Image (cartoon, coloured by chain):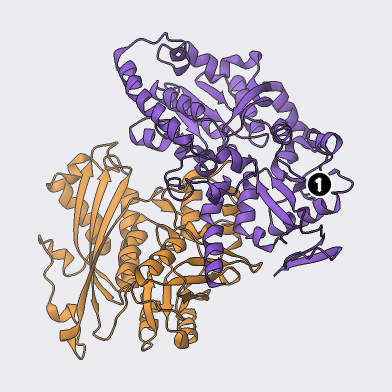
Chain colours: A purple, B orange
């Protein structure tokens, strides 16, 4: 199974999957990063790292939209719920810790927080309940953004006034650039199949053109991922951006979805949990659609979190509540500072090398971004217990 | 009058009419029809003429049901509330005998629906051979209950030579599942959320009396029986491993799953091992009897897709050997299943 530096070509084979790889000398491990939560999960679920020769190191990048959502954004959603909004969100977000609470906990406190499967479901809630203000939490990469844009367009055409979107969308290409500029030492990317189905490969072509690094758009089956790794290995010398997942991804992407996104959103800077501010790596709602922008709509509300920031809030209860919160907020920020997710996201360390991993930081009680969502690299590592099995193997020889 | 009113829970004429016209009409028997404060059960009936009836033990269990929606593809809350209690009794090796049912109904609930639920309870209890002998009805103000909640309790008798417990798994034992995994959880979820899939999913909710009686009659075979309801197969395997102080290795290739469940799971980011089942058992059986038990399950109603899915070991871990020959941990679900984004 493991590579032998003397062989120019090796075949690594699990049951039902095999691929021919051009082996490099053992001293030079090739670092391949995937940047999609579904890939992170698939790699862990299928145990693909166990199939890899020693010469290939698979790293999970910042591919989970929930994981890279900053604490402040979660706090903002919670504050919106406290201000009386009905929050409609994808389920992933429910357990993600802000600095002092989670949406799950807030729902148990009686806040109106609902899990939906699509922004169009959220729009339906608004249509059926004109007396409440529904805020959909727009989170995710280019995969989820088109449906969110569509929900805003539908809200306008149907005259639904009580619907708005808190836009926290992020886009992938600039994040990859930032990783490379930060010296993450990556030799190749497994590119996100779902994202590229929308964007096409053009936004990622800078990888090979400017950085000389191959990127392969991969599907999500074990075979897809293994085949993509093979394609990356083959194109190390003459790097290119190419598609393995041809059954779903066209080189030009999905034009219709792109148009919808361009109509409603424009590029903005965004803060990534664990990585910091990255220029042009986010989406915000265009001025023409400001009516449906939660940030815009709620800033007019007296008790809104956006108004609060500028210190205009009055009203006893809310103030007291916030004073109380601020102690906890500070405390947890200090606690998080021990978290090494930044290094996990850039592939500098493995999840189990973080001092908090599985001790203080677990899926039930996550301390850092990579543990908060099921698709985070620490969570996948924890869930599928690769580390436990490795420990056991080491014990039993 | 076609809806439940607060008066139906008030203990007067309206309530008596409801009990007679709905519950007794479909579920009535000589004990229930007496409408006493408590059912009087003859000891000889409880412990039927077994050779050493003195060594028999009673099994007693209770369970509450709050499924949403109350009617789902493949069943309803009535069938579920009988199967839940019956299958729990079976998992201790008991023969289910008597059960009670308590209804907490929301004001405004359609009486037609209640009739349907009562009818389905009656039918399922007949199928399971368990007698409904006690009941209670409460009506709660609109908004304080979501439609209808049902609690059922059941009594069964454990024959003298049966020793089935979650603590009994030992290295070398075989692990068997009685059929496809995750159908109930996914059927209810898709009914609740209005998700539509190419092939419709149906709940597996069923009473497994015949199946369990068939396998516990194989001497020295069955050590542990569990029904993988909430928390699914993953939870049960982990419970068995931890309570018996063993590990379990499961083989992915052997796990029976409907393709429809699998693709729905892929779409929503669920692990089918975490989905609830309401008509399945997991049996840990002595290695040398595994084939006999498998045969017996396959011959029983609801058991045709049974498989031997793994083996007990002493690793202390519940692991899955994947189709690719790699290993991973099967972890316990955290609680609420939440769909993911992409």
Q: Position of residue A103 (x, y in %)?
A: 43, 34
Question: What residue did someone put label 1 on?
Answer: A243
A197 vs B255: above or below: above
Relative to residue A296, is residue B36 depicted above or below?
below
Residue at 57% over, 15% down: A291
x, y percent for residue A158: 58, 22
Residue positioned 81% across, 53% down in the render: A233
- What secondary structure is found at the residue carrying circle 1? strand
Q: Viewer-proximal residue, B338 or A170? A: A170
Residue A264, above or below A360: above
Residue placed at 46% from the left, 12% from the top?
A307
Q: Residue at x 74, y 67 (%)?
A: A13
Q: Quadrant of the C terminus of chain A?
A: bottom right
The residue closer to the viewer here, A56 or A243, is: A56
Q: Say left or right for A361 vs A349.
A: left
> Residue A288: where, in percent of width, then height?
65, 13
Question: Is B271 placed above or below B210 here?
Answer: above
Question: Where does the image place residue A287, in percent across and percent down from the top left?
Answer: 64, 13
Q: Classify 10 Å Cα crowding around label 1: few (below 14), some (14-19), many (20 and above).
A: many
Count of numbered badges drawn on the protein: 1
- Answer with the quarter of the image where residue A181 lies: top right
Could one spot residue A64 in this view of the protein?
no
Direction front: furthest residue: A27
Chain assignment, label 1: A
User: Which quarter shows the N terminus of chain A?
Assistant: bottom right
């Amino acid at each position: 199974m493991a590579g032998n530096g003397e062989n120019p070509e090796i075949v690594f084979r699990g049951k039902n999957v095999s691929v021919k790889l051009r082996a490099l000398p053992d001293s030079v491990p090739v670092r391949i990063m995937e940047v999609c939560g579904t890939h992170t999960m698939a790699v862990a679920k299928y145990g693909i790292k166990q199939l890899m020769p020693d010469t290939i190191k698979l790293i999970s990048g910042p591919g989970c939209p929930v994981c890279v959502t900053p604490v402040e954004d979660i706090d903002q959603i919670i504050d919106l719920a406290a201000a009386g909004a009905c929050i409609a969100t994808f389920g992933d977000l429910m357990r993600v810790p802000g600095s002092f609470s989670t949406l799950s906990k807030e729902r148990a406190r009686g806040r109106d927080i609902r899990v939906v499967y699509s922004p169009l479901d959220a729009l339906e809630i608004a249509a059926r309940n004109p007396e409440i203000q529904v805020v959909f939490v727009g989170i995710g990469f280019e995969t989820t953004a088109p449906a969110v844009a569509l929900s805003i367009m539908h809200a306008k055409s149907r005259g639904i006034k009580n619907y708005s979107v808190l836009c926290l969308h992020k886009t992938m290409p600039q994040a990859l650039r930032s990783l490379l500029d930060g010296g993450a030492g990556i030799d190749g990317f497994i590119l996100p199949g779902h994202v590229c189905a929308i964007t096409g490969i053009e936004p990622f072509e800078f990888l090979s053109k400017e950085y000389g690094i191959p990127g392969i758009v991969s599907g999500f089956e074990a075979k897809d991922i293994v085949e993509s790794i093979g394609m990356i290995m083959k194109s190390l010398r003459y790097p290119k951006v190419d598609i393995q997942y041809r059954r779903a991804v066209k080189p030009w992407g999905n034009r219709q979805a792109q148009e919808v996104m361009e109509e409603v959103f424009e590029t903005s800077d965004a803060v990534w949990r664990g990585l910091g501010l990255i220029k042009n790596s986010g989406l915000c709602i265009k001025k023409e659609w400001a009516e449906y922008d939660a940030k815009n709509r709620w800033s007019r509300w007296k008790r809104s979190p956006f108004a609060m920031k500028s210190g205009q809030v009055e009203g006893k209860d809310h103030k007291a509540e916030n004073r109380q919160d601020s102690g906890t907020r500070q405390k947890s920020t200090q606690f998080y500072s021990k978290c090494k997710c930044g290094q996990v996201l850039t592939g500098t360390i493995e999840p189990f090398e973080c001092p908090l991993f599985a001790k203080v930081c677990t899926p039930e009680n996550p301390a850092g971004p990579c543990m908060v969502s099921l698709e985070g690299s620490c969570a996948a590592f924890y869930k599928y217990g690769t580390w436990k099995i490795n420990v056991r193997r080491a014990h039993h020889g | 009058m076609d809806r439940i009113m607060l008066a139906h829970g008030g203990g007067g004429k309206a309530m008596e009419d409801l009990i007679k016209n709905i519950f007794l009409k479909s579920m009535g028997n000589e004990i229930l029809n007496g409408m006493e404060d408590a059912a009087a059960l003859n000891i000889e009936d409880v412990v039927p003429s077994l050779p050493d009836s003195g060594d028999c033990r009673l099994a007693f269990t209770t369970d509450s049901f709050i499924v949403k929606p109350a009617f789902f593809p493949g069943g309803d809350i009535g069938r579920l509330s009988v199967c839940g209690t019956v299958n729990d009794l079976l998992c201790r090796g008991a023969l289910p005998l008597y059960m009670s049912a308590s209804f907490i109904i929301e004001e405004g609930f359609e009486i037609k629906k209640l009739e349907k639920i009562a009818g389905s309870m009656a039918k399922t209890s007949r199928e399971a051979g368990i007698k409904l002998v006690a009941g209670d009805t409460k009506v709660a103000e609109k908004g304080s209950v979501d439609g209808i909640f049902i609690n059922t309790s059941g009594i069964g008798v454990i024959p003298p030579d049966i020793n089935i417990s979650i603590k009994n798994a030992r290295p070398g034992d075989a692990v068997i599942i009685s059929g496809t995994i995750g159908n109930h959880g996914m059927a209810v979820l898709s009914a609740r959320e209005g998700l539509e899939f190419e092939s419709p999913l149906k709940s597996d909710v069923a009473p497994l009396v015949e199946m369990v009686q068939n396998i516990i009659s194989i001497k020295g075979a069955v050590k542990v029986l569990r029904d993988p309801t909430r928390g699914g197969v993953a939870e049960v395997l982990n419970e068995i491993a931890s309570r018996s102080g063993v590990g379990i290795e499961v083989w992915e290739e052997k796990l029976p799953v409907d393709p429809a469940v699998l693709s729905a799971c892929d779409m929503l980011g669920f692990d089918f091992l975490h989905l609830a089942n309401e008509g399945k058992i997991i049996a840990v059986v002595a290695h040398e009897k595994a084939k006999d038990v498998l045969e017996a399950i396959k011959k029983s109603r609801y058991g045709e897709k049974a498989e031997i899915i793994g083996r007990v070991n002493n690793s202390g871990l519940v692991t899955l050997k994947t189709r690719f020959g790699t290993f991973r941990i099967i972890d316990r679900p955290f609680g609420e299943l939440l769909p993911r984004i992409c």
